[in-house]
Every structure is written in structure tokens, then in C-alpha cells.
Amino acid sequence: MKGHKDDLLGLFAHHKVAANLMMAMMILSGLLALDRLNVQFFPNFNLDIVTVRVLWTGASAEDVEDGITNPLEQRLRTADNLHKLTSTSSQGISSITLEFKEGTDPLLALDQVRRFVDEFRNLPQDAEKPEVALLSRYENVARVLIKGLTDPAEMRRLARRFENELLDLGIDKVDISGLPEEEISIQVDNARLEELEIGLEGIGQRVGAFSRDLPAGAVGRGEGARELRSLDKRRDALEFARVPVMTEGEVRIDLGDIAEISRRPRDGGVLLSMSGEPVVELSLKRAEQGNSLVAARTLDQWLEETRPSLPPGVELVVYDESWQLIKERMMLLVKNGAGGLVLVVAILYLFLTGRVAFWVAWGIPVSFLATLFILYLAGGSINMISLFALIMALGIIVDDAIVVGEDALAHYQIGEEPLLAAEGGARRMFAPVIASSLSTIAAFLPLMLVGGIIGNILFAIPLVIVSVILASLVESFLVLPGHLRHSFIHAHKLHPDSLRARLDQGFAYFRDRLFRPVARLAIQNRFTTVSIAVALLAIAAGLLAGGRLSFVFFPTPEAKIVSANATFVAGTPRVRVDAFLAHLEETLYRTERELDQGRLVNLAVARHGSKAASGHGGGASARGDQLGALQVELVAPDERPIRNDQFVQAWRERIRLPAGLEGFTIVSRRAGPPGRDLTVRLSGGSADQLKDAALELSEAISGIAGVSEVEDDMAYGREQLIYSLTPAGEALGLTVADLGSQLRTAFDGQLIQIFQDGADEVEVRVKLPESERARLSSLHRLNIRLPSGESVPLTAVAEWRSRRGFEVLRHAEGRLAVEGWPSRWERVEVVLRTP
């Protein structure tokens, strides 16, 4: 009997070098893909999300909702292929998010949203131009802290220098935290304004008229044209001080004579500290096409070159190195692959010959490399999900080769020629192996049909599995038969006393004397066998149904980052929040000492004026003087005996919660889908009713055993003073617009101009002094300018009443919504949303 050479299997089995050439191509293509595949934390996926952001400084959340969010939502709800529309109205900012259906062209969606926004002509006069952008996804690589400097100007200069150096070296994006935006503040007290009989708005107009760069065209075209332009735009405090405010005859009053002019941080900026010292954080990120490991090597090289040249006392501290998680997962794959290779060779050697065992085991790295090439062609990447799938696929790679190799060896051992045995093994096993592979592919293909962001992330698993199966089939049926043929040709007859012969005798004894009787008994008592299988299935189902086997949708290794977020009642001075953050830091290190388990805390960074994000690589968007957070990096889980839950519990027992604290949570960072274990959305038409429902709901659910970290996302805001004109004010010719404009200039400041200072935008504002704006009593001393030019006390033309407002108002699908926990409430829609 002779083999067939008229098909692909026969060609590779008969040809002497075809198998080696195919193997070489698989190895080289895999090495090429390994060099070009991106290394990142999560797979690439499109975010079909467009954001609209409008700034209106000084406005309350309710004003932003009424004046910007509601009218914009009405227009944007008609966008084509819109899947979900949500918005957030907070103090001074309106943010609207539009999520489109899968398959929508993001650029067309962006263009349509921008057109809708441009058609909206009813923006408040003081609101800034809307920013419309397609949401881009960046992944955190590492964070670098700059510490050791107390001069804010020097810290800013150094941080900007480091940012430029890292960007020049190829880092995709660098976000800076701890450097608040700056402004040139022109502060004139009320008494001086009365002496000069001028208002703040008049001073602002005067400054704006003098501080300008104005081109005036060209002159002298017939004699060599010259351009006319002025260069009088001021950019520092001394230049603004020389602006003339009043000129009467020989008397000139400059701005510096009546105003306090300084360059200072804007109110509400976010500051960072470590051990009580101010720090600045550089967050290094990679874009979708960036490589996390390349960015990490760039960072290491930059640190090695920069640290020796740092000023005395300045340190660079690196933490939250997310790229290490990817490296650890890759090393796990290499370790498991190497361990699996050793086990496969050892086990195969027990049942097959040494040469056959070697070529079957050699298929693991060859198939892995070919898998990487297929993954590269399909647009995949090396990430945490694809590495997990590769680890899972280790067994699939070996199974096909074992089946082919064992069948070929069995036929060779009963007397077939090496060529016929090798080729016949491939032909006989072709149909069953293909059937088995197709069934595995069919089991994983439904994962490709999962939609949304989660579906995009999980898509990497079936993609890798299908790629592994294809590579394994090529290796098993085209490469392996040629190698088996040569193995059989060079095989030697076994000596009866050799180790191989004794192993074969032992396996024959186990097969014929032990396994065969058990198999015969199971076949003869088939109903008993089936009953045992059904009973085992019922036990497995019972373990799941009874909760003895827990279910986790997205398993996450124990995190190194733990965040403690504190939210005080709106209007709380920042000094009280800072005191609580200092208490948190003190109790943190005291907990570490009292547990007496060695070093547990790597570092702790306090965030003054913002929250810390609990998701991987995310940033917290909430800002305010009443917010504070302590972000803690613990020692790697493998290097400490204490688990996160134990440490957090011990830390909580030592924390004293102060009065005025509205919310306090300590959570470990989690990867995967955002959100909590259970989220309940309450929606309705009344903000007060929704807040009452959320409070009742959180109070009820807090009493359930095992529930912790209960909060809602509709925080109360500062107390509001609602002003209105009195009949006397109307009689004097004042309007609400006049009154509001003067109050806004006095307390929020009149924006005169914005200029660029390197990478920073600096605003110039005219306002009352800080000492007057910080006291409520200043309302009783403030004077209002009448249209006639005279001034009258504010109390004579205005009256006000107080009420409590909200920090944030959120909309979902056009309705006011708050996310919290379930309760009974009349006329309130309750939507349970679980990951």
C-alpha cells in the first residue's frame, strides 16, 4: 500500500522539506507579529461616544440645567442612530454624553452633533463656546510624582519641562495633576470704587481697551508696504499695573494705584500632597496604537537620565505602574507554557516514544507563534484578555497533535511503513479532529455576538481561540506528519530491558488489567453510569444555586491601589477637608505599624479638592472644596500577608469621622466594567423628590447585613441666595440684568482676556478683594451703580431668600435621574441595572 500525493496532506507527508519550510514560516511570521503587536492592558475597541461640554463659570447646577443642558438635550435627542443620551449639570459646567449604536460612523456622528450645537443660539451670554469632541480612550502606563519643591512657580516650570521631554521621547499623553490653572487677579475694594465713583465693570472695560494687540492693515504699498499693528496686550502683573484708569488734566491714576494685582491659582483647583508636602503628578498614558511596554522602557530610560540632574532635594517617585500587570501576565503565560511543555513531554514520553513526544511538544511554541501572526492579521493585540485566552488555549494546542501522533505511532508499531503510518494518522484523524475543532469554535463564537463595550472587550477571547485552533490544525496535519515520518525511520528497536520497553509493558498492564475491566463494567451497566453522571451534574448545579460556589462577572486580581474618598457638606471650607485627610494619612500609617506585619504601604497621595477614581487608569471628574481623597498604593499582594479587606477593615476601625461628612468610602481599584455590584436608578421630574427617595433608600439598604459603601450621586450643593429687584430698584431704573452683571463681576469676576503662557492658559479677571468675597457681610456693604452713574447700597435695591441647591443634576434619556439603591417611592421609576 502506498500513500497519496494528490492532495495537501499527501504532499506535505511525502515531501522531505515541506514540513520544515512550513514550520519555519510559522515561526518567522510569529516573530514578526510579536515585534509588531501592540502590548496594552485592554483590547482596542471603538467608543461610539460624543461629548458636549459647556462652561458657565459662577452658575449653579440648576442654572446650568435650565439654561444649557435642557435646551441642548432637546436638539440632540434627534441625532441619527442615537443609543443613549445622558448629561450632568454641575456648578459651572454642563456635560452631555451621546452614545451611538454600534456600526455608526463616528466622524459623521460628530459632525451632526457639532451642527446641532452650532444651531443653538440661545446660550447664556457669559457661557463659553461649547466643546464638541469624539471620546478618545487612553490607558494608564504609570504615574510619576515630583516632590521636594515648595515654590509653585518652580514646580510648574519643572513639571512642564518634564512633560515636554516625555512627549518628545514618544509618550502618547501626559496629564498633570496638582498644578491648578492660574489667573491674573485684579482686585479693587468697594471703598476705593466709591472714592473714584466708578464700578468694577468700568475698570474691566478700561483694562480691556488698553490691553490689546490690534492689527491695522498695511500702509505704503507704493513705497514698500509696511504692516501696522499694536503690541499692547499685557501678560504680567507689572504691565497691568501701568494701565491708566482715569486721566483728568495732569492727574493720572493707574490701575496699580487702586488695585491689588497678582498672578494666583484659580479658585477650586486640585492640589496634591504626600506626607504633608506638595507634589505634582505626571500621569503617563498610551493611545490606542501605543505600546505599554515600549512606553515603560521610555520612562525607565528618562528616569535614568533625569534623576542625576535634578535640583537638590527634588525627587521623582514612580507608582501605579499598570504596565507591570501586563508583564506579570506575560510571564505567567511563559511560565505556564514552559511548565506545560515539560509536563507534556514527560507524560507523552510515558506513552509514546521520545521522538514522537518531542515533535508533539514542539508544536506548542510553533502554534503559539502562528497564533500571534493570525492575531496580528485580524487586528488584535497582546493584552490582559488575549493573554488569558492564550493560557486557556494551551490544552487545545496539544490535543490535536497528540491524537494524530498517537494514531500514527500505533499503526507504525503494528508494522506499517513510516510514511504510511504518518500519512495515515493524519488522514484517519482529519475528520474527527476537524469536527472537534468546529465544535470548540461553535462554543466560543457566541461571545463574538455580545454587543457594547463589554462585548468589544470579550471579543479577544474567541478571536484568540479560533486563531489557536487554526494554527493547531496547520501544525498537526501539515507539519507534524513529515516529522513523524522521519521519527519512525530513525527509530531503533527496543531492547527488552530498556526503560522504554519497561514503560510500554507497564502501560500495557494498566490498559489490559486495570482500565479495560472498569470500562467493560461501565458499558455493561450503562444506566448506572448515566445515573452517576446526572447525579454529578445535579451536585454541580446545586453548588451554584445554593450560593456555595460564588459567581464573579469580571474576576480581578487583588489590587495594589486603595482609594479613600471623602465628601463633606457643600460649602465646607477646604481647611476642614485637609485636616480630615491628614487624619486619614496618620491612621493609615498607624494601622500599618499596629498590624506588625512588616511594610504594607508603599505610598499615599492626598488629593485636595477632588475624588480619586476607583477604576483602572481612570480619572475622577468631580471637583470642589468639599471633596478630598487619599490614594494609597500597597505593597504587591504576593509580598504581604495581609489582604486588602483585612487592611481596610483595620484602617476603618481607627478612623474618626468628623461632623459634616456627607459620604465616606474606601474601595480597592477594580478592573473591567465600571459600576458597583448593584446600581439602582431612580428617575422622575422633581429633584427634591428624587433626593428624598435616594436618602430613604440608602438608609434602608444600609441596615442589610453585608452591604457597605452605600452612596448616591446626587449630592446637595451649597446654600443658595436667590436675589431679586425691589420696587425701589425698579423705580431707579435697574434691571435684573444690570444687578446680576454687577454681582457676577464682584464675586465671580469679569473676564477681561485670556492669554497663552507656554502650555498654560491664563485668565485676567477683575473682582472684589478676597477678604470681601469671603464674608457674607460684604453683601450689606456693597454698592450698586445705577444707570445714571450714581451708586446705592445693594440692600436698598435688592432682596434675597435662601434655599438649598444641588451639587450635580444628572439626566438619563431626558429625565432627571439619581443612581442609588432600591426603595418604594410613589411615581418614581425604578430601574435595576447590574453588570
Image (cartoon, rainbow, N blue to C red):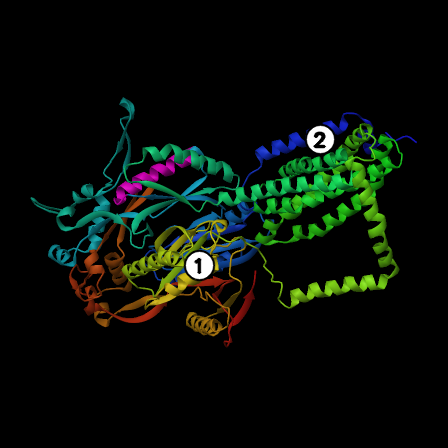
State which quadrant residue 369 falls in: top right
Vertical position of residue 284 compared to residue 63: above or below: above
**Of pointers 1 and 2, the one earlier in the residue sequence:** 2
Res. 23 mark = 2
Q: Say which residue appears at 54% left-offset and 55% top-offset.
A: 673
Residue 157 on the magenta segment: yes
| Residue 491 visible, this angle | yes
Mark 1 to mark 2: distance in Å?
Answer: 52 Å
Q: For the C terminus, which image quadrant? A: bottom right
| Labels 1, 2: front one | 1
Q: Which span of residues is magenta-colored?
A: 149-168
Residue 420 on the magenta segment: no
Vertical position of residue 173 compared to residue 576: above or below: above
Horizontal and vertical percent for residue 17? 76, 25
Circle 2 packing at 10 Å, graded few (<14), some (14-19), many (20+), is many
Res. 647 mark = 1
Q: Secondary structure at mark 1?
A: helix
State which quadrant residue 19 falls in: top right
667 left or right of 189? right
Q: Amino acid at mark 2?
A: Met
Horizontal and vertical percent for residue 435? 79, 46
Q: For the N terminus, which image quadrant? A: top right
Q: Amino acid at mark 1?
A: Phe
Horizontal and vertical percent for residue 387? 60, 44
Q: Nearer the viewer, residue 445 or 2?
A: 2
Q: Say which residue appears at 54% left-offset and 40% top-offset.
A: 39
Which residue reaches farthest right? 1
Q: Nearer the viewer, residue 671 or 618?
A: 671
Secondary structure that dominates the magenta span: helix
Q: Nearer the viewer, residue 620 or 692?
A: 620
Q: Secondary structure at mark 2?
A: helix
99 left or right of 59? right
